[in-house]
Structures are given as structure tokens and as C-alpha cells.
Image (cartoon, rainbow, N blue to C red):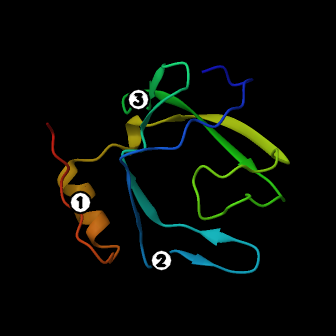
Amino acid sequence: MNPRIWRAPPAFTNVTYTLFPRSSTNNTHWRVVGLCRGCSQWKYPNGTIHTLDQNNDNLIAWATSLGKPSNPSSNTSSFPQHDDQNYFVFDFRPARAKITDFVSAVQSLGNNSAYTKPNQG
């Protein structure tokens, strides 16, 4: 991915979002403590598949905007161009954990449904 071409990937399909009770909002900030299963790979409109590499560096982008999405409840909503954006390289290797440790950590967050190990297919 060329970091100079800022495009959102298409909306994820076949994903599961879990928000945990430690998530909160106030007048100026959101704090999201969550888990997104199925959010590490996506296909661009040209057919190219991009996958985050758990064994290497990944280019991670962030953006902020004072404008609101046209339909905040939809992940396909249009929104105004960002007021600020940038990217950084993040090494995923130190964040790796054994699946049993990960499941224990997620379950300790107290969500409403137990997280189970995904199928390894």
C-alpha cells in the first residue's frame, strides 16, 4: 500500500465486533475497548487482498475529522475529508500471545458473551 494514497478499504464483511464494559464516551472523546474478529484482511476494489502480517511490521493509519459521518450507524457511510491524518509502522511481533492467554485476557474484560478460540480450519 502506498502511504501517500489515502483510501479507506471497503467495508468489512463477515466480521464480529465485541464491545466491552470498559468502553465509554463523554462530550469530547470515545474510549473503545473492543475486539474485532475478521478485521485483519480485506480486498480492495481492484481485487488486491491485503492482510496484516502478525510476524512483521505493518503500516497503520489514523485520521481525525471535525465533520460527522452522513450516517453514523453505517460502516459504509460517507464522511468529510479528514482534518488531520498520518500513519506509522507498528511491529506486531511483540504483541503476539498464546491463544489460551488471549482468550483468558478477553474473557476477563467481562463481555456479555464468552469468547472462544476461532476455528483453525
**Residue position marked by numbered label 1 in the rendering:** 103
User: Circle 2 is placed at which residue position?
Assistant: 22
Indicate left or right for 79 with 15 as reference. right
Q: In the image, which disc is placed on residue 94?
A: none
Q: Earlier in the sequence, mark 3 or mark 1?
A: 3
Mark 1 lies on a secondary structure that is: helix
Indicate the position of residue 46 as horizontal and vertical percent values: 55, 19
Q: Secondary structure at mark 2?
A: loop
Residue drawn at 81 percent across, 46 percent down: 82
Classify 14 as above or below 54.
Answer: below
Front residue of 105 and 120: 120
Disc on the earlier residue, 3 or 2: 2
Q: Above or below — where is 98 with respect to 121? A: below
What residue lies at 53% left-to-right and 26% top-to-bottom? 44
Q: Position of residue 6 (x, y in %)?
A: 72, 31
Q: Is residue 108 above or below residue 69?
A: below
Taking depth in this image into account, of 57 and 119 the one nearest to the observer is 119
Q: Quadrant of residue 9?
A: top right
Distance in Å between CA atoms under marks 3 and 2: 28 Å
**Could you tell whether 104 is left or right of 34 in the image?**
left
Q: Which residue is mark 3?
A: 53
